[in-house]
Amino acid sequence: MADFVIPDLRKMKLPADLKKLDSKQCELLCSEIRQILIDTVSKNGGHLASNLGTVELTLAIHRVFESPKDKIVWDVGHQSYTHKILTGRLERFDTIRKENGLSGFCRPDESVHDAFISGHSSNSVSAALGIATALKLSGSKRYTVAVLGDGAFTGGLVYEGLNNAGKSETNLVIILNHNEMSISKNVGSIAKYLSTLRTKESYHKTKNVVEKALDKTPLVGKPLIRAVKASKKAVKNVMLNSTMFEDLGFAFIGPLDGHDLEALERGLYAAKALCKPVVVHVNTVKGKGYAPAEENPGEYHGIGSFEIATGNPDVVLPDSYSSVFGKELLDLANKDRRITAVTAAMKYGTGLQYFAKALPDRFFDVGIAEEHAVTFCAGLASMGMIPVFAVYSSFLQRAYDQLIHDLSICGTHTVLCVDRAGIVGEDGETHQGIFDIPFLTSIPNTTIYSPSCYEELRLCLKEAVSSKRGITAVRYPKGRDNSLFEKTDLNTDHTLHSSGSRILVVCYGRLYENVLKAAEILNNEGIVFDVLKLVKVFPIEQELLDTVSGYDTALFFEECYKYGSIAEKYASVCKNVHSTAIEGFVKHGSVNDLLHECGLSPERIADKIREHANG
Amino acid sequence: MADFVIPDLRKMKLPADLKKLDSKQCELLCSEIRQILIDTVSKNGGHLASNLGTVELTLAIHRVFESPKDKIVWDVGHQSYTHKILTGRLERFDTIRKENGLSGFCRPDESVHDAFISGHSSNSVSAALGIATALKLSGSKRYTVAVLGDGAFTGGLVYEGLNNAGKSETNLVIILNHNEMSISKNVGSIAKYLSTLRTKESYHKTKNVVEKALDKTPLVGKPLIRAVKASKKAVKNVMLNSTMFEDLGFAFIGPLDGHDLEALERGLYAAKALCKPVVVHVNTVKGKGYAPAEENPGEYHGIGSFEIATGNPDVVLPDSYSSVFGKELLDLANKDRRITAVTAAMKYGTGLQYFAKALPDRFFDVGIAEEHAVTFCAGLASMGMIPVFAVYSSFLQRAYDQLIHDLSICGTHTVLCVDRAGIVGEDGETHQGIFDIPFLTSIPNTTIYSPSCYEELRLCLKEAVSSKRGITAVRYPKGRDNSLFEKTDLNTDHTLHSSGSRILVVCYGRLYENVLKAAEILNNEGIVFDVLKLVKVFPIEQELLDTVSGYDTALFFEECYKYGSIAEKYASVCKNVHSTAIEGFVKHGSVNDLLHECGLSPERIADKIREHANG
């Protein structure tokens, strides 16, 4: 330990050497990590507040457990940056969220220390139980640690996991990272319940579970065992009892101060010593150590780049598809009392903050609970309301059965506003919105609109709300409308630009702009083609099938997985259809780079058309 | 009331007249209903034990609440037969589960008293909250009642619903029908927790919530208010406190004896009087009143027809695709310790009872928790295990996001044994397995096998288990293999029967037998055609595309929704493909009748082929 006073992450063997640090060195390390986090996220964008809140917790986990022999599963991965830094990824940390760089979430193919994939909320307990069960079946005594925020506790999958884990007789440690914030302010009874735990100082029952645990504690390194013994009484004081988790079969430790490294390590050693499923409740402060983020953690949840000095984040884009949707919906709702708005923990992300403020009685943030959101909408709709569920494409996947069972069979009219449809960019595979068209078209009684600009979004939303038809989805991309095309003749069905060419290009959504740019490229080469811009992309009218069939060649360009794409449906009927859809999962990178890779940039679109024009 | 001593359901105005009955008449009525249930289910098949358990509860609900002004939402609908009888559907009750007859579940299009659709578990709280919220927004004081079994409490959607409902300030009454049985024996910590509630006689805290409730009780009809007042003390004794539900923000009443009508009514009146979200815990005996079902409720959960005298049920078919799968998997698992089996509350239904008995350490019944099942499998697989999740097609829909996020992105190898694939018959729209091919093919890294007989199922299962490929699904229908075709040349890829015809018929699974029968019909007419039997139906090899393209006409027959079907994929590449897939939801009826309606019986297949042969 005398080797270095100021620990140098670049020279340490990670994570093993972390166990050698003394408390002063740990403190220095935490400060350094916070600076790296702020510097990097200010350049690359990403999740800041959640990561600043878990610096000490992550260090404690890596000092108490032994990754990768012990398995650490991060829920969502919003909070795993310190884990990346402490497991040998500091050198590449400046590439995070950039194409071919580190992922912003956990990925087993990125590091052996990422025990499971993350990105979508609430899966960590189930995944960790699978891992812990495999360890148990193999005779291993190793630990599996799941780290999840209180936000993840609003998703039903967590309960399915807890229900099975409580009695599993595995060495499973579930760390509840309680920062009283999920993505926006946490909602529901669970949040309130957890907050009760967070603040209560004592409890009607006292158990000596920690003492027992300490009696069983194996040799854990001299400094620690000393610290633990010296503070036995202190530990006992922080041991509270949680009837809910104990009802579910868990031991319970906490709440612990998530920024007190010693307290954290004591609690985690106690959890280890129990050798049974245990919930450790840790209180953290989101944004810890960076004043702007501490003061306004919501704005620093997921952000683009920002100035460190001013702390000016760009998360709330007043000019985006989301905000245009949010404002338009409020306008419509002011005229029609039947309209209600539902979000699954994405009030700001979906642009519903305007609605929430103006019409709080008709606004429902249900937590990270997409299944509930859809079934709740079905209940509202069954009574004649017009529910509008604004949801990211990749998260709507979570409610597939509810769409079929609770909405589609009865033909119940509900509007889905599918935000982040198509390529989203830096968040990578788990967040790309490329499956909504395949799975929504596989559900009867579904209509899908895909506007190509703000004004079309407004038109589509109006039509979707006033429609009487089953599931009506309006899908639009993340971010701004950058289209330059002339906004004449806009409608909610389709527009055909015909110049008598034998080649037809078919597209929808923001790719229309790319197709027009491809036309500019090709017109200079003397290549002309017709363009069919779809707005109502599904179901497909016979008239459009006839139109497409009338061409020698119809080239489709889509931000959509190839199986289940719109092109596939046309191609199955029209013999002249050629599709450019997405072949599989799409990694992270900038939207434009990824579109180019998928053959959907203006240049690649032009290439494809040129090939057919010259063939 | 003097009009009739023995109540005659056929002459009563239902459900209103139920409120006029005295206790003796209620008792007679319950006996009569039980006899109707036993008679009808013995002829039509259906759910017996759960329905026998809820006769008094249903009567109490309809006497205390006023349907359809108050809304009653039944979870799953396994227990709604008495509700159907008491809401004017007795005359048609003998048609239940038959084509064009009453549905075996709740359907708003069948009766105004069915407030919401049922069939899939755990949606009732969310749907009821939507309905209750709509009532509240409209200024109505009416009640919404959700009735769910303890089995439904193993599904995460219930918690998402409870988390949002607890603080909703709606007139929502959630009745927990506790019979300590879901479909098979209930699993997990929740089950144990609820059982604790079920049996405890008193509690450390006593609240006078019932007394307060009674003080607020409006006029509820003389006999009842008298009964309530006289037994105030008794009511207080049955009032227990549930920390878990109270933690979630609910008032709690119970446990009540679910076969004591007076106790039930007192409890429900108290729940009404609270005018806030309340959980009412009711203990019932599954199979109540029919000895064979009481003794063995698992066998009388969902059954075919049976003899009333002997009570001989046919639920456990020793000769079925499910049992062949179950026995084969056990054989494989005896040779390979990595194989683990997972079911979501369908141990018997999926044929896993053999595995569960022989290898209990590697068998996991996770409750009605398909999302957890998939993510748990992903955790197991990430450690080198070979998890096999046996699940009904229509319930696998519930884990669509987990298949994408937790399995597919990392290419994790897990075997899905998709039982009840294709038309299932009497259970209707909610249970037909017609979406698994559309949604599984929309997920990258997926392979799908569809065997046409028992021996092919064994071959496919062996290959799926030994495969290294991502998601490997083996799908097979409900019930027996009735195929008569010669079992030579079986394999896991495809078989082409070529006689030089220009017409090719393509099929997979049990429809192969129907196609062969169609060939018999047509051969007599001098019409011959080639047959391609697919076993590995997806992904599609170029060789098969070339084969299919080589014919003038390729006719596909599939038990699959048309958008996302295998034919659609071939058609999008081959210009000669004509598909017979399923156009939308399929109602209930016998499998053969429904196949005929969908154009998939031997006769309809012959018609289609004839049309092309003569065209």
Image: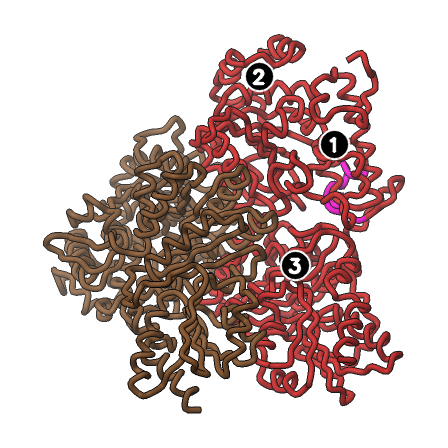
Chain colours: A red, B brown
**In 3D space, how far apart are the residues under numbered discs 3 and 2 (Cα atoms)?**
48 Å
Name the amino acid type tagged 2. Answer: Asn
| Magenta-drawn segment | A292-304
**Chain label for disc 1:** A
**Chain label for disc 2:** A
Report helix, strand or loop for mark 2. helix
Label 3 packing within 10 angstroms: few (<14), some (14-19), many (20+): many
In this view, the residue in front, A536 or A10, is A10
Tag 2 residue: A237
Where is residue A222 drawn, in percent x and y?
65, 9
Tag 3 residue: A433
In this view, the residue in front, B463 or A397, is B463
Label 1 packing within 10 angstroms: few (<14), some (14-19), many (20+): some
Where is residue A456 drawn, in percent x and y?
72, 73
Name the amino acid type tagged 3. Answer: Gly
Note whether B297 is above or below B115 in the view shown. Answer: above
Assign the N terminus of chain A to one quadrant of the image.
Answer: top right
Tag 1 residue: A88
Q: Is residue B74 visible?
A: no
Residue depicted at 79% across the width and 39% down the height: A92
Check if mark 3's residue and mark 2's residue have beta carbons within 8 Å: no
Assign the C terminus of chain A to one quadrant of the image.
Answer: bottom right
